Amino acid sequence: MITAMKPRTFRRHFRESFKNLRRNGWMTFAAVSAVTVTLLLTGIFLVIMLNLNKIGTDIENDVEVRVHVKLDATEADKEQLRTQIEGLPEVESVAYSSKEEELQNIINDMGSDFTLFEQSNPLYDVFIVKTARPQDTPDAARKIKQFEQTETAVFGEEKVENLFSFMKTARNVGIVLVAGLLFTAMFLISNTIKITIFARRKEIEIMKLVGATNWFIRWPFLLEGLWIGLLGSIIPIAAVAVGYYYAEQAISAKLAAHFIEFLGYIPLVVPVTALMLAIAVFIGIWGSFISVRRFLNV
Amino acid sequence: MIEMKDVTKKYPNGVTALSGIDVTIKQGEFVYIVGPSGAGKSTFIKLVYREERPSSGTVVIGGINTATLKARSIPALRRKVGVVFQDFKLLPLLNVYENVAFALEVIEEEPAVIRKRVMEVLDLVGLKHKARMLPTELSGGEQQRIAIARSIVNNPKVVIADEPTGNLDPDTSWDIMKLFETINERGTTIVMATHNKDIVNTIRRRVIAIENGRIARDEQRGDYGYEA
């Protein structure tokens, strides 16, 4: 029975909720700390996972099949292979890189010691194939391998698959950890509210006797839970907002050399802090709601 | 005002507190509920303010059937029924005025109305001059007066009292009874469970005796009927 609340009533609930917070100072502190720790870990976890996800997607989008052309292939054979590759439905683009160009790339990356190989180039001519959808890469590679002029076709499958399986494990461990922490925080909030209610059970009994509605009784406790959640979210949100600013600057500079990019400050911090705030509000209100419900017994 | 038809109350632990209760109490009546301890007096009282629901039969209070009353409609019923207990149930941190005003504040009454009504009932119970004192600074009789003031501050049709003089000495008990008579004279129905033989035999009113969960006696100007 939620009816429009009079401003006077709302002010009363507000006052009562703060009074409760003060009265159970230590329990409030414990509950707020639990929310802080939980949200801090949740925040860090979210930042890491979102970035890993982005890096993973970037790498995935960079996956290409390198088709080594048989050493004895003629120009005509190579043309034929290119036509065959381009004929595959998965393929988006095909680029050619001669073995001289390949060696030059290695020399550029690894240093001039490799100029020795210019006398006898051990490399293959290569077609670099990109598929329209990253997940089609293994299929395309398997088909290309069967063409006559293909020596072999590689796409760094182990690296990619290792990365994905690592991310999957990290994500699952993180989710379990965060879920456990959220539960603990909610439990502590719920217990704090229970103590508050217990301290005021006589008052509640009288309120019920003289005909106060259940919502009237409930409101101060829900607000109390909300404050606990919000108080607990201050430090974690500040930590993510400030921490990511410096972390992004420090780490992206180092990672830029490897063509890895972190998520930008605004695109990461805005959704992550919004989600943390939402979690804080939710566990605060829900934690107190379950205590009050049990007590009001309706 | 209060109508019970073939009411049975069984508690979940298997105890049958009341059975076959048929009672009609009219607006403005003054009724004593008497009987040995454990006979079902308290259950009877609790049925009236819907602390308990009948297991079978109907309990109608001021037109509201409590057997089918939804939980969220209980507050509406409670606002028609004032309740007074043996142990007063006052809030120790609130002063006399605040204890009485509390009953109106939590049903969201207008502040101006609250001030007016609280001073009226404090005047009626004779404690206007002690409005700023805490309950612990007052005698038992005075505390019960505050509880009575609180029970009538929202003008209920009926006041239910469960052993209201149980904790008070005889002289104070008489004062409390005078107060209940005054309230009754203003048209409020009074239902009082009591063990006080002297009061029942002196202030002669309707007496309903409950024994073993059944109505043993219902007399318009009855007496206590038990050896105290």
Image (cartoon, rainbow, N blue to C red):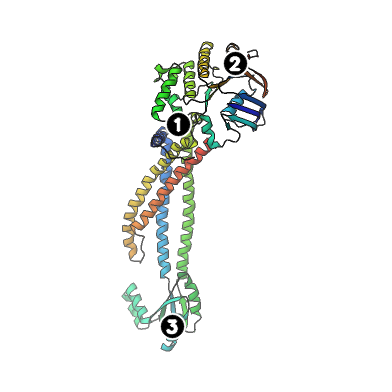
The mark nearer the N terminus, 1 or 2, is 1
Q: Point out the frontmost of discs 3 and 2.
A: 2
Tell which subunit mark 2 falls on.
Answer: B
Tell which subunit mark 3 falls on.
Answer: A
Q: Secondary structure at mark 1?
A: loop
Circle 3 packing at 10 Å, graded few (<14), some (14-19), many (20+), is some
Circle 2 residue:
B205
Tell which subunit mark 1 falls on.
Answer: B
Three-letter amino acid code at the position of disc 2: Arg
How far from the left and from the top, in percent, is residue A282? Answer: 45, 46
Circle 1 packing at 10 Å, graded few (<14), some (14-19), many (20+), is some
Three-letter amino acid code at the position of disc 3: Arg
Asked if labels 1 and 2 share a chain, the reply is: yes
Which of these two is toward me, A161 or B53? B53
How far from the left and from the top, in percent, is residue A161? Answer: 47, 66
Q: Secondary structure at mark 3?
A: helix
Q: Secondary structure at mark 2?
A: loop
- Residue drawn where x is 56% and y is 37% of the image: B70
Circle 2 packing at 10 Å, graded few (<14), some (14-19), many (20+), is some
Number of marks in the rendered image? 3
Q: Is residue A40 visible?
A: no
Q: Give the image quarter of residue B11.
A: top right
In this view, B22 is above or below A80: above
Circle 3 residue:
A82
In this view, A292 is above or below B32: below
Circle 1 residue:
B106
* CA distance separating discs 1 and 2: 34 Å
Which of these two is toward me, B203 or A291? B203
Q: Point out the frontmost of discs 1 and 3.
A: 1
